[in-house]
Amino acid sequence: MDNGMDNMLDMYLFETNSLLEQLDELLIEAEKAGDFTVDDVNEIFRIMHTVKGSSAMMEFSSLMHIAHHIEDLFFFIRENGLDSLDNSHKSILFDLMFRSTDMLRAEVSKVENNKPLSDNVDNLTLEINSFLKKISKEVPPAAKEAKPSETVKAQEASPETSASASPASSATLEDIRIELAECPDDPAAFFLRIFFDEGCGMENLRAFMLISSLKESGLEFNSYPSDVETNSLSAGTIIEKGFFLALPSRAEADSAISQINNLNNIRSYELIENPRTKMAPVSEKKSAAASAPAARESSAAAVSPAANNGHQMPSKQNLISVNLAKLDNLVAIVGEIVITESMVTSSPDIQNLKNLDSFLKATRQLRKLTDDLQDIVMSLRMVPVSGVFQKMNRIVRDMKQKLKKDVRLTIIGESTEVDKSIVDSIGDPIMHIVRNSMDHGIEETAEERIAAGKDPQGELILSASHTTNEVIISISDDGRGADPAGILAKAKRNGILTKSESEYTQKEILALLLAPGFSTNEVVTEFSGRGVGMDVVKKNVENIGGTISITSELGKGMRTTLKIPLTMAIVDGMEISVGKSVFTIPIANIRQSFKVKNEDVIYDTEGNEIVKCMNQFYPIVRIHRLYNIETEITSIEDGILVWVESGDKSYCLFVDDLLGEQQVVVKPLPVFLNSFNIKDSGISGCTILGDGNISIILDVLNLYAASHNRYY
């Protein structure tokens, strides 16, 4: 596939997935309300109309046929009103639409994974047609099924026929030139000639979507080329000569222009008055500074963006979709700029020079510009978590139906933004937790909830908020909660207890839920209990630099909290020294640094060093011992303790000295080191310092586990 087709496919997938997500949200909200609104019906019709047209252009027949039949169904509903459906019809329609969107999404997934599409979707389309027959009382389903396909074939086989209803045919369009006298022979009062952004691709599809949008608003007009929906070759004509709308009056023309001003991918347009319908001559001597209404009334000159500010669409928000790989490359380049800037400003050769005032002023300005560039680039990758959250609506809806549980999903903070790569990684963990809550968190029956003094309807709350460096996502339910005795008994049977049951705190008991191989499900169900436990969720969250913790109260419910970094590319770090080595600790993990005396350090029953902070005792991890680093700083009084925290782990690192705070670019470790399990040693990556040396970035959570395993 050439690059042009790749771009078209990317655009098709992006737009189709967006439309299907929009459709899913619409259906869920409509089902909650118990009915469709007129706007819902129009929107579903528009979405299916667009998916049908774009899929037909891309020759994805299964997608086109499904969308086409749903479009027919909602055309009938739109024309006959919602009163044509009774309550039983609406219940069937909701179920049919959810299964149809699942089928459409499955077909799109096949396209994304380069798999062949389904050869036969007759079962679903026949079901849609049967339902249409039922509500329309039309007898022959075969005739009803043939009608749409015959229409499509007729349009494909005979474009002249489809254009015959219009005052001008496609052949006439081929002769159109820029000169006003050779516009199509249409009785319209005005022609609106539109050019799309250069290189945007699929111009015929964009023209078709423009037609649909304008007609949905009630405008009546003809368009040229007239076969944009079925003829992909018309894209070339549109690129060369533009896309024409033939409008019957000035009012319709102004209405169309006002809507076009708010659309994307429109490069320019011009309004042309048809000389054949013009009633009175207008002076040719209008100046370029004439007002917009007067200028538009001139029949001699087309109004262009250059000639009239009214057509420059200044209020339009221009959006483009960019391949994520290109953004990755851009972030990498900015990271290199940050490193190079640091190397230049901290070069020892520069420090030895005199009269550096001008140089230092320039470097400060460079630092400011570099920071601004970095902020902008990072913001390009930030997307709201709403996409992930809204998908949970569908999970909850389907499980409510199958488990016969009455549960409502409450979403809070869905506009919270996080890095695109991280958003893509948290969908599965959140889905797993939501399924667990629905499956065995919420009580089985309303009677059980009422007996416990609760609302008969269960509630699942999905919330997101952010601090300076991380996003906090919580999934909580008001169900049964966790039974500590049951967890301990299960852990004991599975052989994962490391000490006697009486020594476990509430926090440690709940942490067992995240241990490998642990599961509270005794029965394998459709939604959980397949051997993929919360330990896998924990690992997936930690792979993106996040942490997961659980809080619960028996009979009250459970809350699972994910703490996710805003981005993994560039972080604020504290440089520390141990012997001749330099390490970086993420600032987000540091609570405090302080010096202590020998008498401040005490020992636990196993001889391990601990120190008191804020009325709590925390273990001390000596980095030079953990990594066998030679250093002269071995006395606790000569070094510094850095109190760090990650997830449910909080402890103190003993280091030689603090070198200062610095923004660092996270570099992944070389692939050949993967076989050595470096990450399990408490190392998450590395960075290049201003002097060109490499600093190891410490993973605070895994570092504690590494020291624990080493010492115990």
Image: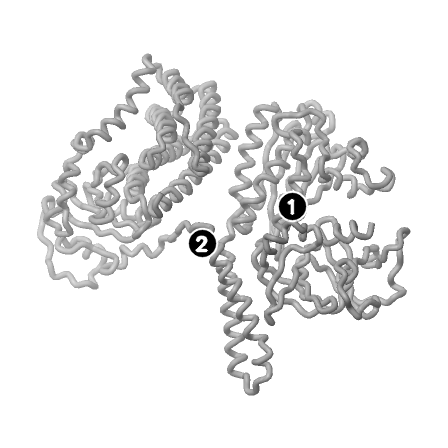
Say whether residue 326 is left or right of residue 353: left
Q: Quick check: 8 above or below 335?
A: above
Say whether residue 177 is left or right of residue 415: left
Report the residue marked by disc 1: 562
Residue at image point 23% right, 36% down: 227
Amino acid type shown at disc 1: Leu
Residue 630 position within the rendered picture, expressed as x and y whole percent measured from the top left: 77, 66
Q: Secondary structure at mark 2?
A: helix
Mark 2: few/some/many CA within 10 Å (<14, 14-19, 20+): few
Decide which of tag 2 and tag 1 comes sooner along the chain. Answer: 2
Residue 410 position within the rendered picture, expressed as x and y whole percent measured from the top left: 59, 38
What is the number of callouts on the image? 2
Report the residue marked by disc 2: 326
Amino acid type shown at disc 2: Lys
Q: In front here: 703 or 626?
A: 626
Q: Quadrant of residue 445?
A: top right
Q: In front here: 132 or 10?
A: 10
Residue 349 position within the rendered picture, expressed as x and y whole percent measured from the top left: 57, 80
Residue 84 showing in the rendered view: no
Residue 378 showing in the rendered view: yes
Q: Quick check: 703 above or below 287?
A: above
Q: Quadrant of the N terminus?
A: top left
Q: Secondary structure at mark 1?
A: strand
Residue at image point 65% right, 55% down: 684
Residue 695 position within the rendered picture, expressed as x and y whole percent measured from the top left: 64, 64
Residue at image point 53% right, 69% down: 340
Q: Which callout, 2 or 1, points to the residue nearer the camera?
A: 2
Point out which mark residue 302 bears.
none
Q: Quick check: 208 above or below 574?
A: above
Residue at image point 34% right, 15% down: 141
Say whether residue 609 is left or right of residue 292: right
